[in-house]
Amino acid sequence: MNKLFIRILLLSLFSVFLCCARPAGNENTVITMKTTLGDIRLRLYDGTPIHRDNFIKLVNSGFYEGISFHRVINNFMIQAGDMMTRSVPVGADADSLDTYTIPAEFSTSYFHKKGALAAAREGNDVNPEMRSSGTQFYIVQGTRFTEDELNAAEQRINSNIKQAIFNKLIHQVADSARIAGTPLTDAEIQEKASARMFEYLAGNENYRIPEDQRMVYLNSGGVPRLDGTYTVFGEVIEGLDVVDRIAAVETDQSDRPLSDIKILKMKIEKK
């Protein structure tokens, strides 16, 4: 059975269980993730219900059983959820990000502290709405920051947000012109998008990292530069030492672990 057929088959199965009614009573969900290096307990946020319910459906379907952590960067994060890592060793097919996507659910209350559970996604150039991968997630390990480093991270967050908004405006202007039957040149699209961007900048202040979150980044660590551009939908409540162990494994030049680290089972403890 070739890899393309496997991918098509699995995507078809996704469409079956995702079309069902949204599960009820998903508040305060805690999930135990058993890995080959230990157990991690996760709490899903009720403030991101689309991501919460999607993750619960995947867990209940057994999707994550046998999936590998295919991307690991020490002092940054550990990533899993690529369906191809179940049937083949971690390699060139990993990190495909070509399954279904779900809408972003950004909240200033949820940030990339150590232990944050967040959704992976494709880059802004092909994904201006910053939609999340339906299956791939990462857990933040991160590192502690100084005040100066946080100030620099804050500038990068604002730059990322503005670039993402501008990319989205570019697509909106081009799509509107095409639908209206009056396609524009690249220069005209840029001009119209820039005008809308100036309007946005005039009416919106720069993002500031809240003081309570700054204290977490200073004392516990994380990856603040990802805030506002990747959806955080849960956190580790037990097993940060396991996250550290996974993050510390030896990897190749593509950040793929040299030893296979698998999710053995995920189980919902309570709803």
Image (spheres, rainbow, N blue to C red):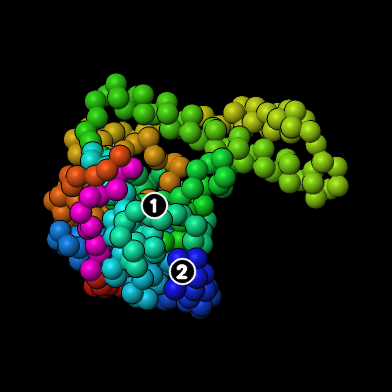
Q: Residue at x 74, y 32 (%)?
A: 186
- Mark 2 secondary-structure assignment: loop
**Disc number at residue 156?**
none
Residue 229 lies within the magenta run: no
Residue 32 visible within the image:
no
Decide which of tag 1 and tag 2 comes sooner along the chain.
Answer: 2
Residue 161: image x %, image y %?
50, 35
In the displayed orientation, state which residue is furthest to the right: 181
Q: Residues within 10 Å of mark 2 (few under 14, many from 20)?
A: few
- Please report the bounds of the magenta region as a residue range: 254-264
Drawn side of residue 258 relative to residue 109, left or right: left
The amino acid type found where label 1 is placed reads Ala
Residue extending farthest top: 148
Front-most of residues 50 and 130: 130
Q: Residues within 10 Å of mark 1 (few under 14, many from 20)?
A: few
The image quadrant that residue 88 belongs to is bottom left
**Residue placed at 41% from the left, 56% from the top?**
93
Asked if residue 143 can be seen in this view, the reply is yes
Report how many numbered discs are placed on residues in the image: 2
Which residue is labeled 1 in the image? 92
Q: Which residue is mark 2?
A: 2
Q: Nearer the viewer, residue 12 or 166?
A: 12
Main secondary structure of the magenta stretch = loop
Name the image quarter holding the C terminus: bottom left
Amino acid on which disc 2 is placed: Asn
Residue 259 is inside the magenta segment: yes
Residue nearest the observer in this picture, 269 or 69? 69
> Viewer-proximal residue, 202 or 161?
161
Mark 1 vs mark 2, CA separation in Å:
15 Å
In the displayed structure, would residue 8 be above or below residue 110? below
Question: Could you say where residue 231 lies in the image, as x and y percent from the top left?
Answer: 42, 50
